[in-house]
């Protein structure tokens, strides 16, 4: 009897879901907030989707903003949002993975993404998670502009 691949251990997120990463990339490239998408290490074997957001849509205090998306065949994911402010970071993360600190589905609170809270989403479909994250980013941008 052969052993399962190391990636499928009970507490593992599993191998990357390349089909889902490509689906998300297709949707992100048509979003007006997105400046560029890049697969890491490449489009043939993506493990990570890097999304550079259009800094022109942010106040000048934000020098860059990005998303880093990982999606796994187990349905686990990590969507990490980072803003750069003159050397400092403001960040948060939506996660679904096995862990010891919270439920499998949880949110790492801004501004440092160190505090976590349990998270409930109406759907774990990748496009629904995408919509939740993009709505939160749009609200964050509105908050940044209104605080000027």
Image (cartoon, rainbow, N blue to C red):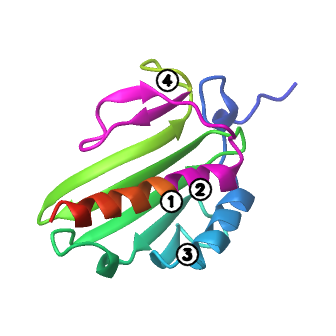
Residue under the image location 47 percent in, 79 percent down: 36
Element at label 1: helix
Which residue is denoted by mark 1 in the rendering? 134
Element at label 2: helix
Which residue is denoted by mark 4 in the rendering? 99
- The mark found on residue 31 in the picture is 3
How many angstroms separate mark 1 from mark 3 (CA)?
9 Å
In front: mark 3 or mark 4? 3
**Is tag 3's residue or tag 4's residue first in the polypeptide sequence?**
3
Element at label 4: loop
Which residue is denoted by mark 2 in the rendering? 130
**Is tag 3's residue or tag 2's residue first in the polypeptide sequence?**
3
In the figure, residue 58 lies in which quadrant? bottom left
Contact, mark 1 vs mark 3 (Cβ under 8 Å)? yes
Contact, mark 1 vs mark 2 (Cβ under 8 Å)? yes
In the figure, residue 137 lies in which quadrant? bottom left
Q: Quadrant of the C terminus?
A: bottom left
**Which region shows up in magenta?**
105-134
């Amino acid at each position: 009897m052969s052993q399962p691949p190391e990636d499928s251990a009970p507490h593992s997120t599993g191998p990357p879901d390349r089909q889902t990463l490509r689906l998300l990339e297709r949707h992100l490239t048509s979003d007006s907030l997105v400046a560029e998408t890049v697969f890491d290490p490449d489009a043939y074997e993506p493990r990570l989707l890097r999304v550079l957001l259009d800094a022109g849509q942010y106040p000048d205090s934000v020098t860059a903003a990005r998303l880093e998306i990982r999606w796994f065949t187990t349905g686990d994911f990590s969507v990490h949002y980072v803003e750069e402010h003159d050397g400092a970071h403001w960040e948060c993360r939506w996660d679904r993975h096995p862990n010891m600190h919270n439920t499998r589905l949880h949110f790492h609170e801004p501004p440092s993404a160190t505090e976590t809270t349990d998270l409930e989403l109406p759907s774990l479909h990748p496009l629904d998670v995408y919509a939740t994250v993009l709505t939160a980013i749009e609200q964050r941008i509105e908050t940044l502009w209104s605080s000027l």
